[in-house]
Structure formats: structure tokens, C-alpha cells
Image (cartoon, rainbow, N blue to C red):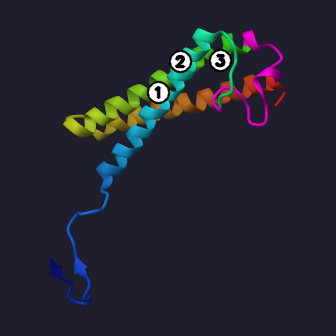
Amino acid sequence: MRQTAAFSFPVTTRRFAMDFNDSMLLFNLIALGCGCFFLYNWFRLRMSGGLFESSLLVPRGKTPQQCSDAQAYIRYIRPRVLVISIAAILYGAVSMAADRFGGVPLQAELVLMAGVLAVVVWYGVCASRAFRKYWGV
């Protein structure tokens, strides 16, 4: 360990510090996990054929039984859940691979991030319209 000139505190090398790549890895893992959660909700909608408690599908303070037309809502929201799940999983996987193996320019990663952000905003608009129409929120 070396000592700084003005302080007597030791300066350590990267023992517990996170650098930019570590924080991006964490962000990519969160995106991948969210994509898996979305895909799980899509599979559950597909297999059960009915609504269930989920923060992704049911507005806060409402129950699935309060939906005015559950089958129409499922037909509307299910393809949109699939789109956001694929986008999040692809973003997380491609970004993790790019961070691990390199070779992907920063501009390409920023375009991918902007695309995923656009899908998230699109899903938010679609979900809020569906919440107004089927739950009166």
C-alpha cells in the first residue's frame, strides 16, 4: 500500500470498488431479469387463459376480477408483453456479450439501448390505455 502525501489514509487498489463495466453488468443483469419476468407473465397468460395478480398486468389497487372484459384485455396485452420481454432479453444478452467479448462499438450499444427505451415507453402507453379502457383507471 502506498500513502498519499497529504493524508495518512492508505490508498488501496481495486478491492471493493465498482468501475463502469461492473455497473453496466449489473444494469444488463437487471434488464435480463426483467425480460425473463415479462416472458414468465406472457407464458402464464398463454397457458392459464385468465388474468392473475401481477404488477405488470393489473393496475395498482385493482384485482383481476375488477377487469371489465378480461379476455379482450388478454388478447390486447399479451402480444405487447411478448414484445417487451424479447426486447429486454435481447438487450441484456447482447450487452453482456458485448461487454464480455468486446468488438461492439459504443454507438451500436447506444442505439440498442435507445431501441429498448422506445419499446418500454411504447409498452407504458399501451398499458395505460388498456388500464383506462378495461379498469377505468
Which residue is drawn at the image coordinates 49% and 33% (left, top)? 34
Q: Which residue is label 2 attached to?
A: 82
Left or right of residue 30, residue 51 in this image: right
Labels 2 & 3 near each other (Cβ < 8 A): no
The residue wearing badge 1 is 36
Label placed on residue 77: 3
Q: How far apart are marks 2 and 3 (CA)?
A: 9 Å
Whether residue 12 is visible to the viewer of this picture, yes or no, is yes
Q: Where in the figure is residue 70, as x and y percent of width and height?
A: 76, 14
Magenta highlight range: 55-72
Mark 1 residue type: Cys
User: Considering the numbered disc 3 on the image, is that residue within a helix, a strand or a loop?
Assistant: helix
Residue 74 location (% of width, % of height): 68, 13
Cα separation between marks 1 and 2 = 10 Å
Quarter of the figure with residue 1:
bottom left
The question of residue 56 being in magenta is answered with yes
